[in-house]
Image (tube, rainbow, N blue to C red):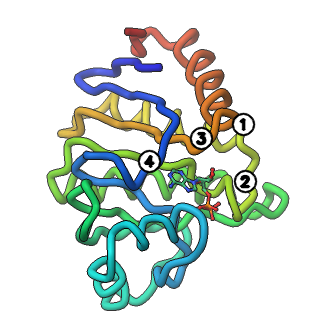
Amino acid sequence: MKVIIGTATLELVEGDITRQTVDAIVNAANTTLLGGGGVDGAIHRAGGPAILEECRKVGGRPTGEAVITTGGNLPAKQVIHTVGPVWRDGSHREPELLQSAYKNSLIQAERHRCSSIAFPSISTGAYRFPLDKASRIALSTIIDHLKGTTPITAVRFVLFDSAARATYEKTLHHLSAEDKDIKNV
Ligand code: ADP
């Protein structure tokens, strides 16, 4: 599924984020930035040691923030590492922190002149954020951002399985039905 917002495209695909040829891919990291399981492990395995070396220099980052490193051996030029919240019960600022993770990733992309960016579904794996809620926060944060002035021209969500893709598609259908600034293509 693909839509247009302002001068940018927003696309949902099923696949592996480590294989995306874009200016930057986003990593769902943890606060240490020293690697982990899930998408984080996959990015470090595919990208090689140069990424971890830069992450070590940064140290760590609190939940909701984002930093950028080289893409190492990945087809993507750079990796934006952001830390999504661990879901507890929804009353520990989880929605707000997930929104910050997306927003700060977009800000990093802009600062480093990335015009194409690919996101995984942050926090919905080991961090257990409910997929439906997470998809609404992820997509509406990005859509709001693309309505402003931005050098970003392409955002791709790379969903790892068909359930995640179906959920994100359903959410994007709902959001586009009630928003005339989202154009279906
Ligand atoms: P978190 O700790 O933020 O929950 P995870 O890596 O555990 O991060 O999961 C986040 C999402 O990334 C999950 O939906 C998981 O299925 C997905 N995922 C795992 N590996 C990949 C990959 N190679 N490409 C894209 N998405 C992936």
Image depth: mark 3 or mark 2 in front: 2
Is the residue 65 above or below the residue 172 in the image?
below
Which residue occupies 34% across, 21% down? 5
Q: Are marks 2 and 1 in contact (CB under 8 Å)?
A: no
Q: Is mark 2 within 8 Å of ligand 1?
A: yes
- Residue 102: x and y in percent read 46, 51
Which residue occupies 34% across, 70% down? 67
Which residue occupies 79% across, 55% down? 90
Q: Are marks 3 and 2 in contact (CB under 8 Å)?
A: no
Residue type at tag 4? Phe
Q: Quadrant of residue 177?
A: top right
Mark 1 sits on what residue?
132
Q: Please give left or right for residue 84 compared with residue 150 in the image.
A: right
CA separation in Å, label 3 and label 2 = 11 Å
Q: Are marks 3 and 1 in contact (CB under 8 Å)?
A: no
Q: Which mark is residue 129?
A: 2
Q: Is mark 1 within 8 Å of ligand 1?
A: no
Q: Which mark is residue 119?
A: 4
Mark 3 sits on what residue?
137
Which residue occupies 33% across, 32% down? 146
Which SS class for mark 3? helix
Residue type at tag 2? Phe
Is the residue 150 above or below the residue 55 in the image?
above
CA separation in Å, label 1 and label 4 = 16 Å
- Residue 106: x and y in percent read 34, 50
Q: Which mark is residue 98?
A: none
- Disc 1 or 4, which lies upstream in sequence? 4
Q: Are marks 2 and 4 in contact (CB under 8 Å)?
A: no
